[in-house]
Image (cartoon, rainbow, N blue to C red):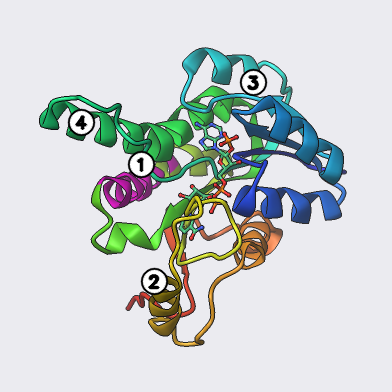
């Protein structure tokens, strides 16, 4: 029977690639994003159902959850660098705005979406959240938010695994070809990020999508509560 899959942040980059691997497996896939034009266009191009939903809004997320009877896979891909603080704010207010933005985009989006659909997740289902190598590095508010995402994932796994639902974070290294860097990536920075990998290449959205597909497969049922690092060796674990 075909699976029902929800991918937040499915209109671009990693989320879109994840949506596409599940669509290729005949799943019924729902993608979300905040902008109606990209939601509509991506839905048309991929065959997914598009839903405009800010994953940081409790009202929007609750309305999204109401669409589902049962859900097999939730992918929390929505996230990104913090919004620039409005001009003219006093320094501490600007700092607070930046931290709120990072935590909202990269942690609370996953917390809210997962809480809203968790009763609908079927036994054998999966929650997959996209973390970052920034959690292991000098990632500032963004890295701290992704580190918190991994800590939240561990407790969510303990709560949902008894129901047969696995919960894992895929911690991505540098992934080229997405909108994440908003045109700010320099050649020097790109070369430095590639140089620190063992295989001397940038990651692709497909690298993450295939890992997500595996984590939602029958072969991965005993993998839960984990952070899986996909970075070409740029960060290694013991
Ligand atoms: N690219 C990398 O090198 C890299 C490395 C490590 C981790 N990551 C993580 O991978 C995930 C995907 O990033 P990406 O590289 O694919 O970037 P991307 O191309 O910018 O995609 C981000 C997606 O998230 C959506 N989004 C952002 N905030 C949202 C919100 N509040 N509610 C709903 N949708 C939201 C965006 O659409 P709208 O803007 O229209 O809402 C877009 O669909 C992020 O969590 C990011 O932190 C990326």
Tags 4 and 2 touching, CB below 8 Å: no
Q: On the image, numbered disc 3 is attached to which residue?
A: 64
Mark before the other along the chain sequence, 4 or 1: 4
Tags 1 and 2 touching, CB below 8 Å: no
Mark before the other along the chain sequence, 1 or 2: 1
Structural crowding at the residue carrying mark 4, measured as other residues with C-alpha within 10 Å and reported as few (<14), some (14–19) or many (≥20) = some
Q: Which residues are magenta?
A: 141-156
Q: Quadrant of residue 237?
A: bottom left
Mark before the other along the chain sequence, 3 or 4: 3
**Horizontally, is 140 left or right of 195 in the view?**
left
Reply above or below: 73 against 179: above
Tags 1 and 3 touching, CB below 8 Å: no
Mark before the other along the chain sequence, 2 or 3: 3
Residue at left offset 32%, top offset 47%: 142
Viewer-nearest residue: 61 or 4: 61
Q: On the image, numbered disc 1 is attached to which residue?
A: 152
Reply above or below: 137 against 140: below
Viewer-nearest residue: 167 or 16: 16
In the structure shown, which secondary structural element does the residue marked by tag 3 occupy?
A: helix
Structural crowding at the residue carrying mark 3, measured as other residues with C-alpha within 10 Å and reported as few (<14), some (14–19) or many (≥20) = many
In the structure shown, which secondary structural element does the residue marked by tag 4 occupy?
A: helix
Main secondary structure of the magenta stretch? helix
């Amino acid at each position: 029977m075909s699976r029902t899959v929800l991918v937040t942040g499915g209109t671009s980059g990693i989320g879109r690639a994840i949506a596409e691997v599940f669509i290729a497996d005949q799943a019924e896939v729902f993608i979300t994003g905040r902008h109606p034009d990209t939601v509509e266009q991506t839905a048309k191009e991929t065959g997914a159902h598009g839903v405009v939903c800010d994953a940081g809004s409790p009202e929007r997320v609750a309305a999204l959850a109401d669409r589902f009877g049962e859900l097999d896979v939730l992918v929390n891909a929505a996230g990104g660098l913090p919004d620039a603080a409005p001009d003219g704010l006093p320094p501490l207010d600007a700092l607070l705005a930046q931290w709120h933005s990072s935590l909202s985009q990269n942690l609370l989006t996953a917390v809210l979406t997962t809480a809203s659909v968790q009763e609908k997740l079927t036994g054998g289902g999966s929650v997959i959240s996209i973390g970052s190598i920034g959690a292991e590095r000098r990632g500032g508010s963004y890295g701290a938010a992704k580190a918190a995402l991994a800590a939240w994932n561990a407790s969510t796994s303990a709560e949902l695994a008894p129901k047969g639902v696995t919960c894992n974070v895929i911690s991505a290294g540098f992934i080229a070809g997405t909108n994440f860097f908003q045109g700010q990536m320099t050649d020097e920075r790109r070369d430095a990020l590639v140089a620190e990998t063992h295989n001397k290449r940038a990651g692709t959205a497909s690298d993450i999508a295939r890992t997500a597909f595996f984590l939602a497969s029958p072969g991965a049922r005993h993998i839960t509560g984990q952070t899986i690092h996909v970075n070409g060796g740029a960060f290694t674990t013991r």
